[in-house]
Amino acid sequence: MSQLIAPGTVLGERYKVTSKVVETGDGDSIFDGQDQVLDRKVSIVVAAPSRGEKLLENARTLASSSRSHVQILDLGQSDGTTYLVASHSRPQALQDSLLTSTAALKAASETEALGEHIFGETDSRESERPYVAVASKKPHKPEPIEVSKPVAATGAGAAAVAASDADDAYATDAYEAENYDSDEFDVDEEDDDSGPGMWLIAVAAILLLLGGAAVVYSQLGDMIGSSEEASSEQSAAPASSSASSSAKASAKPSPTKTEAKLPTPKIQSVTRVVPANPTMMADQDATLPQTMDGNTATQWMSYGFGSANFGGTVDSFALAYELEEATTVSEVTIDQVSGTGGSFTVLTNDTNSLDGAQEVGSGTFNAAQVKVDLDKKKQDGKTKYVFIRFNEAPVLAQPITPNFVYGLRIAEVSVN
C-alpha cells in the first residue's frame, strides 16, 4: 500500500514528505512536501500498487495539455511504489487530474486538442481567474466592439482570442469599403483635343525664353571680354579646389558592412544561460522552443520565487537566442503572461556568451507585449546571439505556485 511512503521520507534526494493530506478509497495518497533545493512547497501523489500504471498514464496525458494548472516536477518509484511530485495544488485538483479515469482524462485532452486544431486556441471557459489582454489599437468602427475578457487558464492564448475578434472587425470594415462606388473622374473628349495646343504654347514659351537669354548674354559679352584675363587668374584657384574635391569624391571607399543591406534577423534556436548556477531550471529546457514557435498560446515558465531577486538563488539569468545569420537587430518583442514589474536587459554578441556582450537595450514588464528599441550602432552587423537577461522577476497574476508569486511566463520572443 501507499503507507510505504510516510512523512519524513525524502524522494529523489530532494523532495521531503512532510504530512499526509488525504487518502482515497482506492488506496492512493496525497502528501504535502518540501523542495529542499528551492525551499518551496510541493504536492506528492502516491499511487496504490495496483494503480501505478494509471498514475503514469495520466501524468503523460497531463504533460501534453497546455491548460492544466498542475505542473509535474518529478516522477519515480520508491520501494516499488510509484510517486509523482507536482507544484503545490489543491488535493481535489490532483485527484481530478492524476487519479481519475484515464479514458476521461484522455477525452478531455482530445477535446482540447480538437479545439486548438479547429479554432487555433484552447477553451477558456473552465479557468478561475480573469486575465485582461491590453489591445494596442482599437478597431475603426462607428460603434465600439466589446471583446470578451479571456481568463487565466489560456494565458497568452486568450490574447490570441481577443486579437482574432479584432481582426474580424477589421475584416468587416474592409468588406464594406469594397462595396462603395469607386471614385473615378469623367474626362470630356474636349480635354484630349486640347492636349496638342497646350504643348505648342509650352514650346513657344521656351523658345522665347531662350531667345531673350541669348540677347542678354550677347550684350554682356563686351563687358566680360575686358576683364577676361583677370577673372581667369582668379578662377584658377577655385578650379583646382573643385578638381581636388572631385578626386576625393571619386576615391570615396565602397560602403561598409553596416551601410550595405544586412540579412533579416531570424531566430534559429534558444538556450538558457545561468553562469552562477548552470543547472538551475534545466528541467524546464524542454519548453524553451515554445518561446519561438510563433504560437502565443504556448509558453516557457521559470520556477516560482518568493521575491523579485529570484529568492536569492542567483543575481540574474538569461535566455540566449541564436540567429540564422549575423546581422543588426533593431527591435525585440516579448509576449508574456500576467507579469507586472521586474526588469530585463537586452545584450548582443557574436558568440553564445555574456562575456564581452554589448548592452543595447532594457525594459520592464508593463504590458502583455513589450517592445524594446535596440542600439544599432553598437552591433555593426555582427550580432549572432541576442540575450534577454532577467535582472528582477515580475509579480505574476497567475503564480506558478500559490506561495511564490514572482516568476516568468514567456509566450513568444521575436526580433526585427
Image: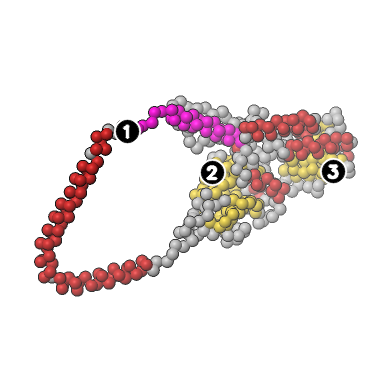
Q: Is residue 98 visible?
A: yes
Q: Mark 3 points at which residue?
A: 77
Q: Which residue shows up at 86% across the image and 44% down it?
A: 78
Q: Which residue is drawn at 64% across and 32% down?
A: 118
Q: Name the residue under label 1.
A: 185
Image position, residue 17 (x, y; %): 81, 41
Disc 1 from disc 2: Cα separation: 46 Å
Residue 240 x/y as whole percent: 27, 72
| Location of residue 68 by image quarter | top right
Q: SS at mark 2?
A: strand
**Magenta region:** 157-186
Residues 149 and 408: in front is: 149
Q: Mark 2 points at which residue?
A: 370
User: Badge 3: few (under 14), some or many (20 or more) residues near its Cα, within 10 Å?
Assistant: some
Quadrant in which residue 365 is drawn: top right
- In primary-sequence order, the first of circles 1 and 2 is 1
The residue type indicated by label 2 comes to Val
174 in magenta = yes
Give the mark toward the camera: 1 or 2: 1
Q: How crowded is mark 2: few (under 14 residues within 10 Å), some or many (20 or more)?
A: some
Of the two numbered discs 1 and 3 on the same chain, state the one appearing first in sequence: 3
Secondary element type, mark 3? strand
Answer with the quarter of the image where residue 237 lies. Answer: bottom left
